[in-house]
């Protein structure tokens, strides 16, 4: 795995994975990224030029993808439209990037014989009831709720079909909700942190009882590298760090850390079709491949993340007004 092509490598998790590779491996990296609103050159700026190259291009463009894929030992496919709320406002780019883009990557690896790891999400399994003792496993039936999660589910099915029909050498991982540095401020945790830093109030959808299973992006990256090197071809691995929290509890932790009363938040219009609870059972990854998360304590990881956003106001502040105006127009 000396030459790794990372699609979506200028996004939140893809850039974290590039940092992981530079720190923990000898691999040289090419990032293929369309540089949408979600991308950030700053997230890659600290990485050495002689090991990381950025190619600006679209994963749905075979003329760009095919020659790049042929030059690499492995492709790690992060590129996606990733925000549920945006998929409710306009599903079109989700279909194009998440489905046509994954199809384009699959055709390229089929031709070149390159190893593929496909990055997916726990949302493909739909949601669980709050009082359900069950968690998602690799055997849970697909049941996506939103245009985003349906497009990710479809991309997983394409990967499985290309493995079975064409012998493509691919693995899939479905990870729970990530948090950490460089996450776009449209997403729940950075939105609330930056609201409070700005003197505003967190905006909680509906009653705030929805549960998400949080994992630090560093732990997602280490799991992906483990699967790429040791995972069995054709297999799916669920990635999670036992981090279930209600949205209300996360907001209270952010408020408390920043010295504000824990009830100083607003309840706003709920998300259409809002999934109630996600929960990952990552036993297969832990027992088969020996992976363990490093951020076992969510509160400690969240505190470090809050401090990172306090220290990187130059990065997020130019996007804050537009992001909040978009939410305000939807009553959120
Ligand atoms: P992100 O939105 O921060 O980054 C996505 C990146 O993909 C951006 O840099 C964007 O410019 C790029 N991109 C978008 N369309 C592209 C295209 N057509 N061609 C090339 N590049 C394109 O997303 P993220 O949160 O880092 O998520 C990365 C991956 O991880 C996605 O596949 C997502 O479904 C998956 N995932 C995310 C989470 C999470 O909590 N954020 C959890 C599980 C899985
Ligand atoms: O302002 C908000 N208020 C609020 O209550 C926002 C932005 C969100 N929420 C709620 C909705 C969810 O219950 O917080 C929870 C988390 O929301 P998001 O950050 O939008 O994440 P989610 O919809 O759970 O999806 C995330 O995890 C799975 C990622 O965005 C996906 O890319 C990933 O696949």
Image: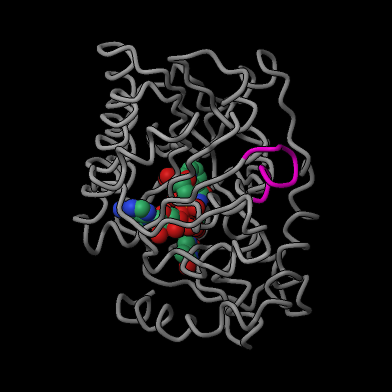
Residue visible at 30% across and 34% down? 155
> Is 299 positioned to the left or the right of 72 in the image?
right
* Up-down relation of residue 180 to residue 2 (above or below): below
Which residue occupies the foreground of this view, 276 or 226? Answer: 226
Q: Is residue 294 visible?
A: yes
Q: Which SS does the magenta portion mostly show? A: helix
* Up-down relation of residue 254 to residue 99 (above or below): below
Image quarter where the C terminus lies is: bottom left
Residue 25 sits inside the magenta stretch: yes
Q: Quadrant of the rendered structure where residue 125 is?
A: top left
Image quarter where the N terminus lies is: top right
Which residue occupies the foreground of this view, 297 or 106? Answer: 106
- Percent position (x, y) of residue 204? 50, 67
> Is 125 positioned to the left or the right of 50 in the image?
left
Q: Quadrant of the rendered structure where residue 27 is?
A: top right
Looking at this rendering, what residue extends furthest in the left direction? 92
* Up-down relation of residue 95 to residue 33 (above or below): above
Residue bounds of the magenta highlight: 19-27
Q: Is residue 210 visible?
A: no
- Percent position (x, y) of residue 167? 33, 12
Residue visible at 43% across and 32% down? 118
Which residue occupies the foreground of this view, 309 or 140? Answer: 309
Residue visible at 45% across and 27% down? 172
- Percent position (x, y) of residue 116? 44, 28
Q: Quadrant of the rendered structure where residue 272 is?
A: bottom left
Q: How is the image coloured?
A: one colour
Residue 303 sits inside the magenta stretch: no
- Percent position (x, y) of residue 290? 73, 19
């Amino acid at each position: 795995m000396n030459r790794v092509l990372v699609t979506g490598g200028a996004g939140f998790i893809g850039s974290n994975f590039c940092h992981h590779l530079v720190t923990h491996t000898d691999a040289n990296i090419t990032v293929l990224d369309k540089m949408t609103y979600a991308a950030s050159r700053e997230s890659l700026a600290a990485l050495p030029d002689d090991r990381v190259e950025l190619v600006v291009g679209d994963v749905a463009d075979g003329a760009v993808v095919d020659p790049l894929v042929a030059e690499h030992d492995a492709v790690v496919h992060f590129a996606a439209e990733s925000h549920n709320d945006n998929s409710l406002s306009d599903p079109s780019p989700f279909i194009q990037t998440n489905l046509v883009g994954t199809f384009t990557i699959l055709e390229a690896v089929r031709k070149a014989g390159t190893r593929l790891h496909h990055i997916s999400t726990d949302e493909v399994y739909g949601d669980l009831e709050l009082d359900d003792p069950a968690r998602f496993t690799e055997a849970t039936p697909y049941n996506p709720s939103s245009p985003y999660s349906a497009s990710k589910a479809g991309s997983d099915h394409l990967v499985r079909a290309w493995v079975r029909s064409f012998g493509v050498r691919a693995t899939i991982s479905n990870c729970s909700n990530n948090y950490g540095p460089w996450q776009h401020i449209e997403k729940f945790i950075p939105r609330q942190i930056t609201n409070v830093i700005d003197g505003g109030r967190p905006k909680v959808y509906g009653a705030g009882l929805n549960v998400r299973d949080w994992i630090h992006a560093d732990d997602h990256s280490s799991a992906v590298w483990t699967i790429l090197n040791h995972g069995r071809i054709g297999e799916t691995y669920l990635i999670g760090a036992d981090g279930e929290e209600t949205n209300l509890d996360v907001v209270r932790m952010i408020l408390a850390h920043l010295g504000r009363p824990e009830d100083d938040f607003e309840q706003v219009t709920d998300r259409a079709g809002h999934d109630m609870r996600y929960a990952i059972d990552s036993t297969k990854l832990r027992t088969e491949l020996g992976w363990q998360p490093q951020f076992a304590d969510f509160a400690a990881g969240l505190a470090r993340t809050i401090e990172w956003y306090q220290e990187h106001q130059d990065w997020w502040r130019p996007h804050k007004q537009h992001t909040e105006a978009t939410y305000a127009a939807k009553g959120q």
